[in-house]
Image: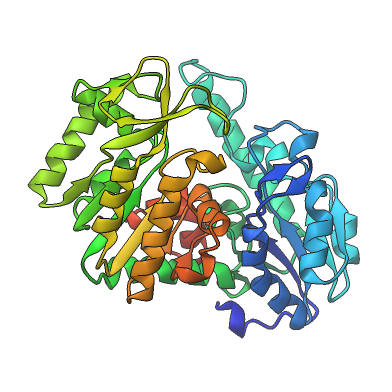
Amino acid sequence: MKISDYNFAGKKAIVRVDFNVPLQDGKITDDTRIRGALPTLKLILEKGGSLIIMSHMGKPKGKVKAELSLSQIVDAVSQALGTPVQFCDDCQKADAQAAALKPGEVLLLENLRFYAEEEGKPVGIDKEDPAYDEAKKAMKASQKEFAKKLASYADCWVMDAFGTAHRKHASTAVIADYFDADNKMLGLLMEKEVAAVDNVLSNIKRPFVAIMGGSKVSSKIGIIENLLGKVDKLILCGGMTYTFSKAHGGNIGKSIVELDKLDVALNVEKMAKENGVELVLPVDCVTGDDFSNDANQTIVPVTNIPDDVEGMDAGPKSRELFAKALDGAKTILWNGPAGVFEFDNFCAGSRAIGEAVAKATSEGAFSLIGGGDSVACVNKFGLADKVSYISTGGGALLEAIEGKTLPGVAAVLGE
């Protein structure tokens, strides 16, 4: 069922959104994910439905944590929707509030992950424990009951949380078992996300340049290896690149490194060569003598970082290399910053990438930005309207581009 064809009049819709927004002192610092869900939520209300909104926040691992309560965002969601939002402080005890909802009314459920059943993983037992398999089996049964309760509040289920679509959680996939095909659907945001990924994978215009940043090679190795079979150029930046430098015997000072992944870094370089992919790595960096915005800076080669400092941003020569690699690109994928962009004094590398991506986009490239940090980058630098598409998903986007089936999509489309 397509959401645009569904008759919501007099119906209660339970909608899985991704309101896992960054908070500082209880205030939202980036509301991109809330704004992303608005078209779906407003469509349901305009069509005469009532809304039950559910989301997770952070990783409480089955424990109630006040700092991760969705009660902190009620006012922001009310303001964004233009209507009062009720709140239920226990997502498994919303029967009465859900039943009382009238058309046009909205109820936000408390953080789903306050229950371990949402993720469906046994808590407090090691995988090596002989009893783990039995605990996992019991948890899966509990997860079904958890999902069944959520489903009982509504007439239909809308999946609009692309950021969690790669997880087979109670609210993102298991709940689908309790709705027939005519009463479960992708939200407008999910439809756009799926189309954007499809555009990158099935309609690649070359040169195709991917930019992968972030702190760890290990967290990106699957997508990096997959991209080496698709892209013409691959720019690697951020903390992960010090592992590449170390693999070649470089001195990296106090920079972040994965010493058990040196062989992985060398293999990435080998694969790039075998696939004819131009691999672009930083050659210099901006260092800091402390992990703070006010740290003393020096610019040094990435292979010769003094012992008492750490690399915190791409240096000027590296920025030139990145911009040159993006010049003339026709398809661009960007996931992960080039440094500690949160600190204004160490964001020049990420800014340079953002501006180069924007320039290529203005010259006809399709640019897809994904992952929380990359999205925060384009917003920080005022470039959001100068790129083609900003994805709300990080891991989900990368797994989709890897060619993996996303449980949150398959649960609706039956793939």
Q: Position of residue 257 (x, y in %)?
A: 36, 24
Vertical relation: 36 (above or below) 226: below
> Viewer-proximal residue, 308 or 174?
308
* Snapshot colouring: rainbow
Q: Position of residue 305 (x, y in %)?
A: 32, 23
Vertical relation: 262 (above or below) 328: above
Vertical relation: 329 (above or below) 350: below
Report the number of numbered marks: 0
Horizontal side of residue 136 vs 11, given as left or right: left
> Viewer-proximal residue, 11 or 376?
376
* Residue 413 seen: no
Q: Position of residue 265 (x, y in %)?
A: 23, 32
Determine the residue positioned at 60% across, 34% down: 139
* Residue 203 seen: yes
Determine the residue positioned at 11% across, 50% down: 275
Q: Position of residue 349 (x, y in %)?
A: 41, 46
Horizontal side of residue 60 vs 239, given as left or right: right
Horizontal side of residue 308 vs 105, given as left or right: left
Horizontal side of residue 263 vs 412, given as left or right: left
Q: Quadrant of the C terminus?
A: bottom left
Determine the residue positioned at 63% across, 36% down: 59
Determine the residue positioned at 74% across, 39% down: 68
Q: Quadrant of the N terminus?
A: bottom right
